[in-house]
Amino acid sequence: KIYSYNIMNTKGDNALKVLLELSGDAPLEDYAWRAEPGSNGLAVIPKSSSAYERHHDIIIICQHGAQRLALLNIKTGERIPLVTEWGGRKLNGPNDLVVRREAEKIVVYFTDPVYAWLEQDRMQDLPYLDDRVKNDGPGFCGVYRVEFPLDLLELSKAVDKERVREELSKVLKVSLVAKMDRPNGIGLDGDNLVVAECCQGSHNPSCTQGTSRWIIFQRKNSNDDSIVKDGNEWKRISIIEDVLEESNGGCADSFEVLDYPLDNRRLLIASCSGGLCIVDLREEKVVARLMTSKKDSCKIANVADGGDRVFITGNCGVWELELQKIKHLYPTRSGEL
């Protein structure tokens, strides 16, 4: 399901309501085995875009069940597929996304990990997931970039859906950013792309339970010879990793980027192994952790920016966490400006 929650009227009759049932559009037979047949990450059209006022009723959603990225009209409930495959093979199941405007285009970055393949009686990160990716998915877990013109949002409301599909095939541009073991949460730090890697289980030696990892990608210069050589416009410029020796669960999943311009610092407030982490992007390390998994086995999943607070979801509820209003992230020493 996809819910709407009115944060300005939390005690009202319609504070919490269902926008869409069966939000993953999974085939009916899949409900007998899929552990996560619904939708996952979602995003609105950027408010900095002039299109926001005209199309604020359209959001972009990741659908595990249908294994696709889609547009959703939250007023009518209508869905229009955006990306369904790579290299002629179906995606695994898009998990998380971030959206920005670039000139007259909407650009979406999204992750496509293993979790749509989770089975109800095997809800762990086990080798069978990699087998499904290899045999029934694109053959790997990936991070993708999608771009389309703003005009497509207007077209998405057209009655003739065949025309919409034809236009989509003409204007939609999809490219692969990277292949990863377990890509999950995704966000932007300026023009750099930050991707969280959700390490769980023990069968994958490079991504085991207790490891929280954030990989930072940068777009290559257009004259970089390696673009032609490897066909990829992106390069990894940094890897931030933290290992919790004793972990009761959780992994690096969703995050938000907090900006402290006076200190030239940016932080991630991120789900991680054990709970919620604060990651200093300049220091490239975890500087604080709020443990939630020890008390009630509470695993943090998603983090969303609410201005002076963040909203957090997990397997034990939805919370809001107020943020202190400070000008400087770190206090200056006596005599410093």
Image (spheres, grey):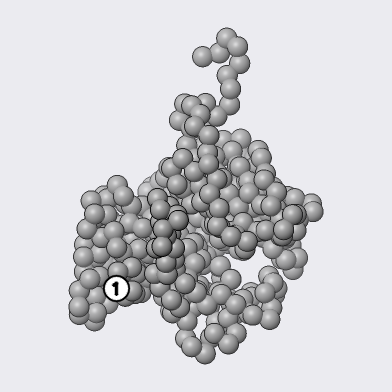
Q: Quadrant of residue 82?
A: bottom left
Q: Closer to the camera, 45 or 294?
A: 294
Visible in this render: residue 52? yes
Query: What amino acid is found at the position of numbered circle 1 in the picture?
Result: Thr
Residue drawn at x 24%, y 65% as measured from the top left: 152
Residue drawn at x 67%, y 44% as measured from the top left: 289
Q: Give residue 139's position: percent from left, percent from top.
A: 55, 75
Relative to 124, does residue 106 appear above or below in the rendering?
A: above
Residue drawn at x 25%, y 70% as measured from the top left: 156
Residue lying farthest top? 335
Q: Is residue 251 left or right of residue 255?
A: right
Q: Name the secondary structure under disc 1.
A: loop
Relative to 91, does residue 229 appear above or below in the rendering?
A: above
Q: Is residue 182 left or right of residue 29?
A: right
Q: Is residue 236 left or right of residue 172?
A: right
Q: Give residue 298's position: percent from left, percent from top.
A: 67, 58
Q: Closer to the camera, 106 or 314?
A: 314
Q: Which residue is mark 1?
A: 76
Q: Closer to the camera, 44 or 224?
A: 44
Q: Closer to the camera, 263 or 315?
A: 315
Q: Quadrant of residue 286?
A: top right
Q: Give residue 131's position: percent from left, percent from top.
A: 64, 79
